[in-house]
Image: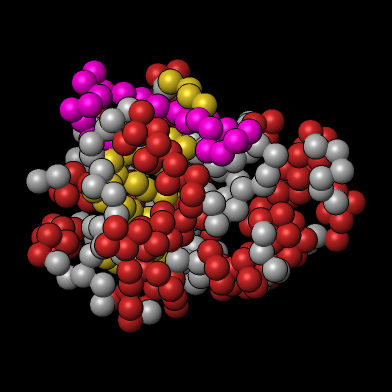
Amino acid sequence: MSARLGGVARAFAPKPFVPHPLFRGPHAQTIVSSKHFPRRRALYEERALYESRLFEVEAGTRILLKCRWQEERHAAPTLLLIHGLEGSTDSLYVLGTAQKAFARGFNVVGMNMRNCGGTEHLAATLYHSGMTEDIRRVLLGELAGRETLPEIYLAGFSMSGNMVLRLAGDYGADSPAALRGVAAVSPSIDLDSCAHALESRGNALYRWSFVSNLRDRVRRKGLLSPGQYDTPALRRVRTIREFDEQFTAPHGGYRDADDYYARTSSRAVIKEIRVPTLIIHSADDPLIPAGPFLDQSIADNPDVLLVLTRRGGHVGFLSDRAAGEDRHWAENRLVEFFERLRE
């Protein structure tokens, strides 16, 4: 591990994740963290403080950015945050991390992937894990480019966690100067094993939720673009793999679901990352198996700090109380990681 990341690791060591005593199991961590209603009200009130901005990622396709700027935005670091599958910039983990980062002097920019955040009318295509070029264009074209922001940090959760790791790996030693650090929480670095996990009996609730939302999205897209999507085929879709086989792969330019998973998973390229990177994952994540994170090539990369906890669920990490922090441990560690990179 590089001396820089070694220092961060030593700083993290006294702050292990200790689960909330009432929500220790993986499903409790996953569900309660995403439905924390008192927190939802407080964070939703802050949405009025964000500037909405449309950015064209390719001809005829725009995405929605939510931006909150420091008074001297060009003198401040900037954190670009991206949500997970069927999430948006209104996802609590995005809003919570943004709140913490802004309080510590960061500009914060939340990126809605194509069609997300109520933007189906802005893109003809579906979004998927291979669309790292959209992130690249926001990073370089809008933030480092038009806004001329010199210091940018990038964070993704779940699906987008895989995407930011894939982007950093694809950059390799040619990472842009403005990109100073990357973080991923519960990233789906091996999509094939994630699809298998979602097909297990214990994950029926998550599978139903994801598939129902994706089917509804395709129906809405079908109304906007008649004839483009085989909406009657949705009746046969019961799993994420079936959805990817029927819709994601053919509309994304992949041969089939297996080809899509192989070409967009970040596991194979994490070894190429050359920008300081934090990966937070829980061994009990019900949706993303821990096995792929034990790949020796990840441990051997001196620019990657892997924090693999025993508990925490999926993008959960609802902790016992710690002095000076709220209960959202992963959000705290993510912002602390970027702060320490600036020292």
Residue 164, relative to residue 286: is it above or below?
Answer: above
Q: Percent x, y for residue 236?
A: 85, 61
Query: Residue 284's quadrant in the figure?
Result: bottom left
Viewer-proximal residue among 236 and 13: 236
User: Is 143 on the left-hand or right-hand side of 322?
Assistant: right
Q: Is residue 71 magenta?
A: yes
Q: Percent x, y for residue 15?
A: 20, 57
Point 50% across, 66% down: residue: 265
Viewer-proximal residue among 299 and 266: 266
Point 49% across, 49% down: residue: 133
Q: Percent x, y for residue 207?
A: 67, 59
Query: Residue 67's quadrant in the figure?
Result: top left
**Residue closest to the far right:** 232
Query: Residue 178's quadrant in the figure?
Result: top left
Residue 136, relative to residue 141: is it above or below?
Answer: below
Asked whether residue 333 appears in the rendered view, the answer is: no
Point 65% across, 37% down: residue: 123
Viewer-proximal residue among 17 and 218: 218
Q: Percent x, y for residue 40?
A: 48, 32
Residue 328, relative to residue 166: is it above or below?
Answer: above
Q: Is residue 153 magenta?
A: no
Asked whether residue 184 appears in the rendered view, the answer is: yes
> What quarter of the picture does the N terminus occupy?
bottom left
**Residue closest to the far front:** 59
| Range of residues picked out in magenta | 55-78
User: Is 199 on the left-hand or right-hand side of 110?
Assistant: right
Point 66% across, 56% down: residue: 252
Colouring style: secondary structure
Label total for image: 0
